[in-house]
Image (cartoon, rainbow, N blue to C red):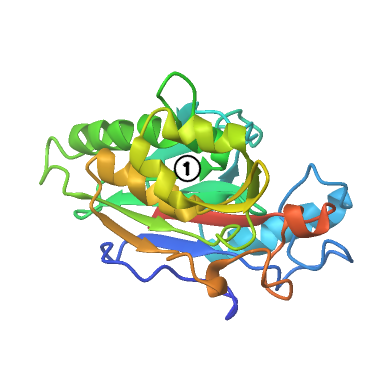
């Protein structure tokens, strides 16, 4: 792995592999320099293809790149599934296929169970996290992962406790939102109000990772690791390491991947 990429520090079994890329290690030119993994942001197609090969070679697995739409749809990865499948979450129970989420301010969430039976990944921007009619992307992924892990482990040891890792995202000192965003969360959970600080008239600073932790706790996921809301995890505040759409508007994409080796 590239020495600048982030390897999650969490109690996953050793055959559960995971990584979060940074902007280092690729071939793209500015403003996509250098490891841009997004093929929809205006970068040269040849450069993106080369970057994806570099990333896949480092994983020694196939990252499946989704077409993310800030929704709550989920797919289970299978051999032959093409890149560009529309979903904001994915699950894998087979070796060699990496659940992969691209971000440039949104929150990537990686999952496994403590026995390492299944893995999953979710794209949790505020829209996907808030969801509609009380169901967001985490509400979709967590029960599906538990079901997949139980099914895959039925002939063996079964599934263990679900654990989650939060990757870098826009931080609570940079994420300015309007009243409608706050209302989308508070309308389903009054405790979410504590994740918003007043900023200006009709504007708030939102703690995206805090909102995700709150929702995960509601879903029974108590062991959550990674992003704690500090500046080191903020994509906006670290331009030399992370892409940020909010900061730059024209930006590359980072990737969080998890797979069974």
Q: Position of residue 45 (x, y in %)?
A: 85, 48
In the image, residue 11 sits, relative to residue 127, either above or below, namely below
Q: Is residue 251 visible?
A: yes
Q: Is residue 233 left or right of residue 141?
A: right
Q: Nearer the viewer, residue 95 or 199?
A: 199
Q: Disc 1 designates what residue?
A: 122
Task: Name the residue located 60 percent from the left edge and 78 percent from the top edge.
Answer: 4
Q: Where is residue 17 in the image (x, y as percent from the top left)?
A: 40, 61
Q: Is residue 79 visible?
A: no
As drawn, the residue found furthest toward the front would be: 201
Q: Where is residue 254 in the image (x, y as percent from the top left)?
A: 65, 58
Q: Is residue 233 left or right of residue 55?
A: left
Q: Is residue 7 left or right of residue 253?
A: left
Q: Where is residue 223 in the image (x, y as percent from the top left)?
A: 25, 57
Q: Nearer the viewer, residue 94 or 27?
A: 27
Q: Quadrant of residue 86?
A: top right
Task: Name the residue located 46 percent from the left edge and 35 percent from the top edge.
Answer: 185
């Amino acid at each position: 792995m590239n020495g600048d990429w982030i390897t999650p520090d969490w109690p996953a079994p050793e055959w559960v592999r995971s990584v979060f890329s940074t902007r280092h290690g690729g071939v793209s030119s500015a403003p996509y320099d250098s490891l841009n993994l997004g093929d929809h942001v205006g970068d040269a197609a040849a450069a993106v293809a080369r970057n994806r090969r570099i990333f896949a070679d480092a994983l020694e697995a196939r990252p499946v790149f989704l077409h993310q739409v800030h929704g709550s749809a989920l797919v289970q990865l299978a051999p032959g599934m093409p890149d560009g499948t529309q979903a904001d979450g994915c699950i894998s129970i087979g070796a060699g296929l990496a659940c992969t989420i691209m971000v440039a301010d949104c929150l990537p969430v990686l999952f496994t169970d403590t026995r390492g039976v299944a893995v999953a990944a979710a794209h949790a921007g505020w829209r996907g996290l808030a969801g509609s009619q009380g169901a967001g992307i985490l509400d979709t992924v967590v029960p599906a992962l538990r079901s997949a892990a139980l099914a895959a482990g039925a002939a063996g040891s079964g599934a263990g406790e679900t654990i989650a890792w939060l990757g870098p995202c826009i931080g609570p000192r940079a994420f300015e939102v309007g009243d409608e965003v706050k209302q989308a969360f508070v309308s389903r959970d009054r405790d979410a109000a504590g994740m918003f600080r007043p900023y200006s008239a009709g504007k708030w600073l939102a703690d995206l990772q805090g909102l995700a932790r709150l929702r995960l706790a509601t879903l029974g996921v108590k062991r959550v690791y990674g992003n704690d809301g500090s500046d080191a995890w903020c994509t906006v505040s670290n331009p030399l390491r992370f892409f940020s759409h909010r900061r730059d508007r024209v930006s590359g994409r980072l990737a969080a991947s998890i797979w069974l080796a």
